[in-house]
Image (spheres, coloured by chain):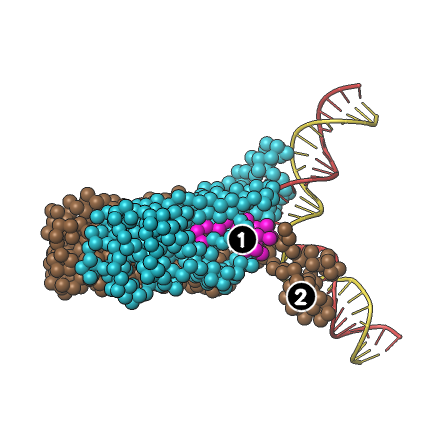
Chain colours: A brown, B cyan, C red, D yellow
Amino acid sequence: MKRKITLKHIARELGVSISTVSKALKNSEEIGRDTKEKIQAFAKLYNYKPNNIAISLKNKRTKNIGVIIPDIVHHFFTTVFRGIEKYANAKGYNVIVCVSDESFDKEVINMELLANGSIDGFIMALSAGTQLKNDYNHLKEVTAQGIPLVLFDRVTPEIKCDKVVIDDKKGAYNAVTTFIREGRKKIALITTKDYFSVSRDRAAGYREALLDNDLEINEDLILEFPSMEVDEKGIEEFFTNKKVDAVLSVNEIFAIHSMRFVQSLGIKIPEDISFIGFTDGLLSKYSTPGLTAVAQHGEDMGKIAAEMLIEKVESEEEEETYTTKVLEPTLIVRGSTGN
Amino acid sequence: MKRKITLKHIARELGVSISTVSKALKNSEEIGRDTKEKIQAFAKLYNYKPNNIAISLKNKRTKNIGVIIPDIVHHFFTTVFRGIEKYANAKGYNVIVCVSDESFDKEVINMELLANGSIDGFIMALSAGTQLKNDYNHLKEVTAQGIPLVLFDRVTPEIKCDKVVIDDKKGAYNAVTTFIREGRKKIALITTKDYFSVSRDRAAGYREALLDNDLEINEDLILEFPSMEVDEKGIEEFFTNKKVDAVLSVNEIFAIHSMRFVQSLGIKIPEDISFIGFTDGLLSKYSTPGLTAVAQHGEDMGKIAAEMLIEKVESEEEEETYTTKVLEPTLIVRGSTGN
DNA sequence: TAAAACAACTAAATCGTTTTCGGTAGGTCA
DNA sequence: TGACCTACCGAAAACGATTTAGTTGTTTTA
């Protein structure tokens, strides 16, 4: 087993000093041609590559970025991650991923662990636990230490940092407007408790669209679940008892389950009832009929987040200016709408 | 902005030496009670945390593991990743993910980058490009340097290292046997070119099951695509021209597309035709009818891979013994089979 | 010919820890 | 009174690289 070779090895082997080797490999003008060539040849022969850790220690730059997401087995987060990874990689950064599993504690632990020198900056989406607890001290700690932070999708106004989100309100507004243009009157909303910033915004868009179109808001048509867990019973009960002709769901799963259930009742989609779901994931694409979806452009989001972060990481000045980029949602029309 | 505090700061502030501080914080017996208490109190007050990078340099241990996968927006890899991340995190390791994007070059670049001190070991699934090129020198380099490596799912006999796979052949064998027990005679296989180790094994299981049940292998019933890209035309042509009553697909997507197409022809699933797909992903679960699937137990796989890797990383001896763990596939029965 | 300039190289500090090996002061024992 | 502990603490090396500030010996220059 040939261990990794270091500058010291090369120096000793060639009878020169470590600094000479270092400079020769950087093609410094300070070193004579012969010496340089000798050293470079030797380094190539033994496949010398500088040790990343040593360089990190010296430069106080790790070229790593930390990504903390609530869940990795989740299409949206995965696409965001892809966007981050692609851009970061192109810029020479590696990505360390931690999964908070929607837990406040794990989020805190992971953050503190990475903050001790392992990364140059964070990109994250808040866990459900954190949003529920409404405690952002770990984020404040990190930013106070001067570590750049970019929040995406699940953000909070409590923290001053760069952010990138989609206009959830507008997405919901447009979806509901689509329903209304189809002539739907009884438009339901399936959502989660509003400590999720996204749920709150989507609900707001839903309400505003109804009001703007002179439809009254019927609280009975809003089905609110405490978490993202699917509650089959809840769905079945809702659709058995309520007469609705359109459904906006804040996620795919609720929509797919609802579609299956109403289909089992013999109700036709989209003739009798229209569906639109948030997140344009695999399920929307492959359900029957295809689920019209509000695309969140995860990959763009990830790319932008990475851009913003690396920009901050690499800028010398300590600007205290933070921006929030708002992406436009797009409606991907499929078979579940348009009768 | 309060910068991170170091041992040196504490030492200077308290008028003691750096070594004293270091020892005091480790609760060493060498340091007097008063001094220890003073130092510990100060450290807590200023929230001192040792710098990971410096420790890594000292110990030649990063507590990072590198994961290289072909694609992150892919349910199976994501579940494996979750298994890895969970276990690694519990053991105090962080995970650096690189996506090879099925490209040989990216796989090589990422590997070399991480191998220069950033990680203690690798877990990876070979990219399509690498399997196609059949060039494993980058893996050989890494193992020659003594960096532990665990391959999962997409492996190669060319490299001596720990491996974890599922018994793909058996999975296919069992699936076909299930078809035969249902009385199916014309059993098709939808697969990809066999430079994918998994495709090869699955095809072998398919053939063996047929032979063992005295059914002849009809090469016309094997639809082979060059890549994992969906070729709608190819699927439609196949199902228009061939009479088949059961289909085993090496992935979900091919199966879902096929199901949709035959349904559009008015063929009934599972009355007229049965379907089984590899990978028990979201699509299988939510398609109509649900797709009976060969579960690959990604999370277990990831966990086992992480176990094997960390075991090797933390063991002192340089054993040259490598094991391959083979997981049993399980058939998840849904509506697409059993008439 | 002495001073200045230059080319080629090295020593040493630095990044933040850990750890080994001393060292000193005070007390104990013979 | 000297030898020997013991308790407590610090200097310095080490990890692997970069970089600043020299140090040579040779060549120009005035």
Residue B31: image quadrant is: top right
Q: Chain of mark 1?
A: B
Mark in the foreground, 2 or 1: 1
- Residue D7 lies, in percent from the top left, at 65, 29
- Residue A264 lies, in percent from the top left, at 15, 50
Give amino acid for label 1. Answer: Ile
**Residue linked to disc 2:** A40
Residue extent of the magenta highlight: B139-154
Name the residue located 63 percent from the left edge and 54 percent from the top edge: A4
**Residue linked to disc 1:** B159
Direction from residue B312 to residue A156 in the image, left or right: left
Give amino acid for label 2. Answer: Gln
- Residue A134 lies, in percent from the top left, at 33, 46
Name the residue located 73 percent from the left edge and 60 percent from the top edge: A14
- Of the pair A75 and C25, the residue shown nearer to us: A75
Q: Is residue A135 above or below residue C30?
A: below
